Image (cartoon, rainbow, N blue to C red):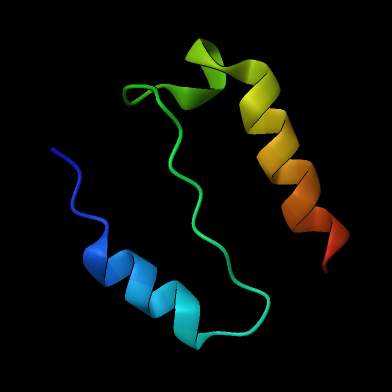
Amino acid sequence: MRRTGQATAMASLRPYTSLVTPETDHFVQLQDPKGFARAVREFLAIL
């Protein structure tokens, strides 16, 4: 079970912060490489 309540609260308090919760196990970059790449690109775009 994922406990995202605290992480969601933390993300909502910081500017330019979002919480990404992929539907994968521990190896997100192997199980969903396109989703992982998309999340990284979106992160890098705001730097």
For the C terminus, the quadrant is bottom right
The quarter of the displayed image where residue 46 is located: bottom right
Query: Which residue lies at the image location 20% right of the left edge and 43% below the top edge?
Result: 2
Residue at x-position 49% and y-position 12%: 31
Q: Position of residue 9 (x, y in %)?
A: 34, 77
22 up-or-down from 29: above or below: below
Q: Give the left or right position of residue 7, taking residue 38 as reference.
A: left
Q: Looking at the rendering, in which quadrant would you find the N terminus? A: top left
Q: Looking at this rendering, what residue extends furthest in the left direction?
A: 1
Specify whether 47 is left or right of 18.
right
Residue 22, given in percent of the width and then of the height, sits at: 46, 33
Residue 16 horizontal/vertical position (percent): 68, 76
Taking the spot 40% from the left edge, 26% from the top edge, the residue there is 23
Q: Say left or right for 35 vs 20.
A: right
Residue at x-position 63% and y-position 18%: 33
Q: State the image quarter where residue 36 is shown.
A: top right
Q: Is residue 25 above or below residue 6?
A: above
View extreme (top): residue: 31
Query: In the picture provided, is 15 more to the left or to the right than 11?
Result: right
Tag count: 0
Q: Nearer the viewer, residue 29 or 14?
A: 14
